[in-house]
Every structure is written in structure tokens, then in C-alpha cells.
Amino acid sequence: MDFAFDETQQEIARLSGDVLGREPDKAWKALGEAGLLALAVPERLGGDGLGVLEVAVLLTEVGRRAADVPALASLALGVLPIVRFGTDEQQNALLPLVSDNHGVLTAALSEPSAPLPSRPHTTARRDGNGYRVSGTKVAVPHASAADKILVSALLDEGPGVLVVDPAHAEVSGGTVRLDDTRAEMLLGDDTSGRVVEGTKEYALAGAAALADGVLAGALELTVGYAGTRHQFGKPLSAFQAVACQVADVYIASRTLHLIATSACWRLATGRDASDDLDTAAHWLAAEALPAVHTCHHLHGGVGLDVTYPMHRFYGLAKELTRFVGGADHRLDQLAEGESRVR
């Protein structure tokens, strides 16, 4: 397959890189003012009407700079599932929070000891025109900054995704506790489990795209450092041991890029992306953090300096590994997928 960017995707990558490099302290607002937060928003709401591939391009550029912005939360966990599953009324109410107001959406999908379950332990019941939700969610990206949280829960009819105002929940870091909390709406008015599965797919695709950028950015930083830092009268890159370790990171980076792009492409074209998403998530969990650790190691003491950007790549790689459930969990998911095929 030819996964080369088309002209639109090339422009998104270029513009994203320019904005993130120019406005590091006000990056989220700057991305919004550049129209990049509205890439997947329907044209009737002032967006570009694009899809998961274009959002993935933006996420990769965010990862490449390890920018501290809620792009994964708002775009992959918020905008994409709302565009795909939300009713017109729900889209009208939720999408402008990001595209117009540069606010934050996120999704609460994981639970203690249960990363991204298809049948959540969190429960919900109908209450008049709304719903009441009870349960504990963990690993919720940017929960404390969110304007709205999409919460997966099990209703009497089946699994669905509800929209909760975090002001009515107990939010602590990435943990959201719901105790008979009022939910405003049921996304797509659907309890078949389809919305939960679709939101999980966007979560994995977005995490893989962001990790793709994180690893590429860490590698670029390390190559630059090893080529200019001298020991024993020659650059670090001239030492065979260093060159071999950098080569290993390069292989991990290119492999993650390929599988992340393949998974996003399959989602964008309406194909079954489950196998590619599971593979991408496993590669992220098993290989990305060790590769970034190698980059950190090759920087020596400089990598421990908080004024140097290496710690941001390492921290983001750790967060993404935790978000997808860790290497052992992702390996179990791969095995379950293989058993289903057989």
C-alpha cells in the first residue's frame, strides 16, 4: 500500500508543525485559531469535514514535539466518535466546544484492572429525560480540564456512551468517580455496544498516531545529540554501540509508523481495523517506551535536565503505554483476536 500523504495531509502536517513550533506556550489556542481543531468537524458546523487520517496527522505532529495539549483527548476521544455516532442535535451541542471555543473533550473508557472494556462495570440507568451513572474510571486523559466527558457504561439494554459534565463528578488526576451522577445524553441514542467499540477504536488509533510522533521526535532529538556531542575526540554517533542502539530505535519507530498508519487507513476507509489496531496498540505498549528509554540513556545526564525536552517524550510514552493497558494486556488482546479468527 502507498501510505504517502496527499496534498491536504501534507499541508496539515506543515501547518501543525509551524503552529506548535511557534506557539509552544499557547499551542492549544493557536491550533484552534489555525482551524486545526475543526479538521473532522462537519462543514455545516464550520469544520473541514475530514476524518481519522487527517486527525492522525495532527496527533503525530503533536507527539513529534511532545506538546502538552489535549489533542488525543479532544479529537480522538471526543470529536471523532461524536461526528460518527452523535445525532445532529448532539453534534450541535458538543462539537463547537472544541472547534469554536477551543475547549476540551475526553472519554472515560478504562476501569480499575480493566483497560478499555467492551462491557464496562460502570452502570447507568434512565432518569426522566436523562441518565444516572455510577462507577470509577481511570486513565482518563485531561479529565481535570475537560468541559464534557464521554463515559462508557452498561445500561439495562446494553453498553453505551453517555455525556457527563465533570463538574458533577469527582475528578482527581486521571480518575473520575461517578456516584449516581447525572448524564446529559446518550451518544447516538445507542445501547448496542457499537458506540463503545467505535470509541475504543478511535482511542487506540489516536494513541498509536500520537506515539508514532513521540518516538519519531525522540529519535530525531537523539540523532542530533549523538551527532554533535563529542567524547574521546569524536562524536558519539561514531561509536558502533551507539549507532546500533539508534538503529534499533529507528526500526521500532518505522514499524510503529507503518502499523499506526495502516490502522488509521482501515478505519478511514470503513474496513475492519481490529487486527491492525490491536497490533498497533501492542507495538506501542511493548516497544515504544523501551525505545524512548534508549534515547534517554544515550543522552546521559543531559536527558535528566528538566530544561531539556527529553523528559517530555519519556513521560508521554509512559502515559500512552498506561492508556492502552500495558504490554501484557495488549498481548492478551492479540491472542483473543487470533482465537476469534480461528
Image (tube, rainbow, N blue to C red):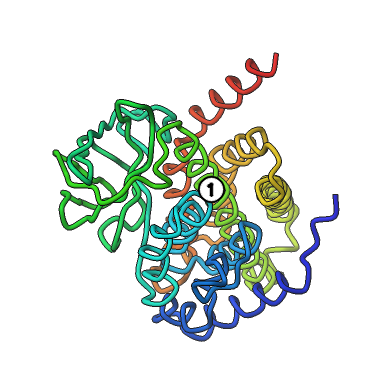
Query: In terms of depth relative to the viewer, which is nearer, 291 or 17?
Result: 17
Q: Is residue 140 left or right of residue 182?
A: right
Residue 172, given in percent of the width and then of the height, sits at 20, 51
Residue 249 as seen in the image, left or right of residue 114: right
Q: Amino acid at mark 1?
A: Tyr
> Who's the residue at 66% across and 78% down the image?
14
Q: Is residue 308 above or below residue 256?
A: below
Q: In this rendering, does residue 11 appear at all?
A: yes
Which residue is depicted at the point 39% across and 47% down? 187
Residue at 53 percent across and 46 percent down: it is 289
Direction right: furthest residue: 1
Q: Picture quarter containing residue 96?
A: bottom left
In the image, 90: left or right of 42? left
Q: Nearer the viewer, residue 215 or 230?
A: 215
Rendered residue at 24%/47% (across/down): 183
Q: Residues within 10 Å of mark 1 (few under 14, many from 20)?
A: many
Is label 1 in a helix, a strand or a loop?
helix
Residue 47 spot, x, y in % from top left: 54, 73
The quarter in which the C terminus is drawn is top right
Up-down relation of residue 9 to residue 335 (above or below):
below
Image-quadrant location for residue 36: bottom right
Q: Which residue is mark 1?
A: 202
Q: Is residue 311 visible?
A: no
* Above or below 119: residue 287: below
